[in-house]
Image (cartoon, helix red, strand yellow):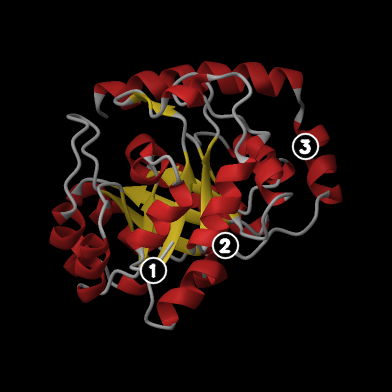
Amino acid sequence: MPATLRQIVEHKRSEVDRLKAGTPMRELEALVAQAEPPRNFFGAVRRMSRAGLTAVIAEIKRKSPSAGWIRPEYAHDDFSPEPIARQYLNGGASAISCLTDEKFFAGRLSFIQRIKDTVPLPVLRKDFIIDEWQLWESRAAGADAVLLIAECLTESQIVDLLILSQQLQMTALLEVHSMDNLLRVRPHVGFPHPGYGLLGINNRDLASMTTDLNHTLRLVDLVEDPSVLVSESGIAEHEDVKRLGRAGVKIVLVGEHLMRSEHPGDALAALLGRSP
């Protein structure tokens, strides 16, 4: 596990232990029982790709360990995700990804419901999921999908989390970076139900924190079903979208490039080759 990821995961373990002590499972189960059914995240992104178009999962991200604050105004305590979510909807997003890790990414779990109250798009909780308790927490907070990072999970953890995600009716985006991890998780993509599983290839090297769009293009031939493949990071131009599309990759997750723009929705429209 790369050093930065190891640091984040170690902190996440202590954070989850603290949160579990304050909110017992029975309380989360009661909240989930009262929650509205999740929106169909898988269906939203596959609907576009089935039509031969690229589906964009547009990300709301204030900062990162490698980039710091993406724009100075994002550091303000009154940061609001709602205007960005509206811009993403108007710019052509199929779904939204929301960072919820507080220490390293300045996210908030409450952002998920605030986004859903603003736009009709399904929302992915992007965090470092290491415990089944977090899946219940995600569903209680309104998440329609969750990110599972293979680099910080054992194979048995991945299987258990995939099963629970499906039981909670949430789409799971199973993310890998290395070829070894792709080969390790490949048999589990779409398990236990193909309508709830996406495979992500992160173009960011978690050791060097550099991005390379060609990383997806090098690994795509190892993916049994490219129609569920999501290319993540390093996508900044319409030509990048077209290159991935020619390789059969029709779903992309884009965050930092959009969030650096003064008008994220216009940047998204340009990425898709549309007029703002």
Q: Nearer the viewer, residue 272 or 103?
A: 272
Residue 139, visible in the rendered structure: yes
Q: Earlier in the sequence, mark 3 or mark 2?
A: 3
* Amino acid carrying mark 1 in the image: Arg
Q: In the shown orientation, is residue 50 left or right of residue 236?
A: right
Q: Earlier in the sequence, mark 2 or mark 1?
A: 2
* Labels 3 & 1 near each other (Cβ < 8 A): no
Quarter of the image for the C terminus: give it.
Answer: bottom left
Mark 3 Cα within 10 Å, few/some/many (few <14, many 20+)? many
- Where does the image place residue 230, in percent across and percent down from the top left? 36, 60
Q: Is residue 44 above or below residue 64?
A: below
Residue 41, numbered label: 2
- Where does the image place residue 79, in percent across and percent down from the top left? 59, 28
Residue 28, numbered label: 3
Find the distance from the CA under tag 3 to the CA under tag 2: 22 Å
* Amino acid carrying mark 2 in the image: Phe
Of circles 2 and 1, the one toward us is 1
- Per the image, the residue denoted by label 1 is 274
